[in-house]
Image: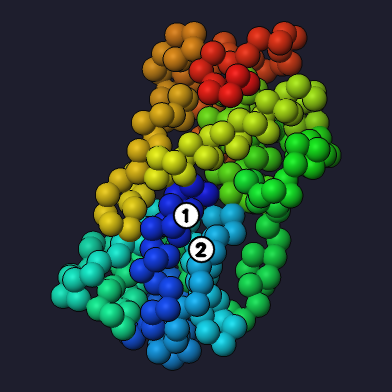
Amino acid sequence: MPELPEVETIKKEIEPNLIGRHIKEIELLWEGIVKYPDAAEFKTRLTGRKIRDLNRRGKYLLIGIDHADTLIMHLKMSGSLLLTKDPAAAPPQFTRAIFKLDDGQTIFFRDPRKFACLWLIDDTEKVIGKLGPEALGKDLTLKRFSEIINKHHTPIKALLCDQTVIAGIGNMYADEALFLSRIHPLRLSDSLDDRELRQLYNAVREILLMGIENKGASIVNYYRPDGTKGSAHTLFRVSHHKGEPCRACGTPIERIKVRGRGSYFCPNCQPNEPIKTDQTSPVSKTGL
């Protein structure tokens, strides 16, 4: 958390308010949030600069600044950006950085766990160059997706969450995609057949688009820029539902660790072996 849908939601909701604005003042309440350059140079180089565009790459938010610099933000596990038009607004608890704009707007970068990161850099590849193709990108075709998955020999849940393999899929959405495609999180990636790869490819896209449509998932710390919560988590079938009955078959949802990540699944719908049937998931919108 936050994952691709949450970062995409933040980008879409703050973009109209930021484009063309100048950064009037920066206050760092915790200088450790800045990873490059040092805190003093970060503030000097960014103050007074104009915001030219906003983009997302995987889970990173890229804010283009005039003169070719880019402000890169990674919210990590607990970060959120809160935008207010009240110039006198007090910073919320756990605010680590404050960006004041020339029109009176203020962005509070909130991060309870102090994992979030900021970079101001002239070459974005130094930070995001190792990312794999975008999970929702046009260049990630079924053919390319299948080639990427099958060339590795690792638990599929861990592979989906590896940002150097495919960018943007995180823990929650990987669990949901694996449930929709009826694949156990410990299945080895090179054991998936063509049918399973097609189902997983479609499920990944369906789940991420659902997350975006519902403004992200507010399990713990994620908030939209206006301070409200997203609702994607209310549609989760397995993630964070340990012990509850599966919506498809009634079997209690289980939680295991996969390469250190808590992973939720239905042991009946997602057996740890290939399913030798054309049966589709009873809860998928796309007939997976």
- Residue appearing at x 48%, y 53% in the figure: 8
Residue at the spot of label 2: 61
- Residue appearing at x 44%, y 29% in the figure: 236
Is the residue under label 2 in contact with that under label 1 (CB below 8 Å)? yes
Work out whether 93 lies above or below 286. Answer: below
- Residue appearing at x 32%, y 79% in the figure: 101
> What is the three-letter code of the residue carrying label 1?
Val
Quadrant showing the C terminus: top right
Viewer-proximal residue among 78 and 9 = 9
Work out whether 37 lies above or below 229. Answer: below
Work out whether 109 lies above or below 21. Answer: above
Q: CA distance from mark 1 to mark 2?
A: 7 Å
- Residue appearing at x 41%, y 13% in the figure: 245
Residue 57 lies, in percent from the top left, at 59, 59
Residue 134 lies, in percent from the top left, at 65, 51
Work out whether 106 lies above or below 288. Answer: below
Residue at the spot of label 1: 7
Residue 181 lies, in percent from the top left, at 63, 23
Q: Is residue 194 left or right of residue 83?
A: right
> What is the three-letter code of the residue carrying label 2?
Leu
Residue 152 lies, in percent from the top left, at 80, 39
How many other residues sit within 10 Å of disc 2, few (<14), some (14-19) or many (≥20)?
many
How many other residues sit within 10 Å of disc 1, few (<14), some (14-19) or many (≥20)?
many
**Comes first in the chain, label 1 or label 2:** 1
Residue 138 - label = none
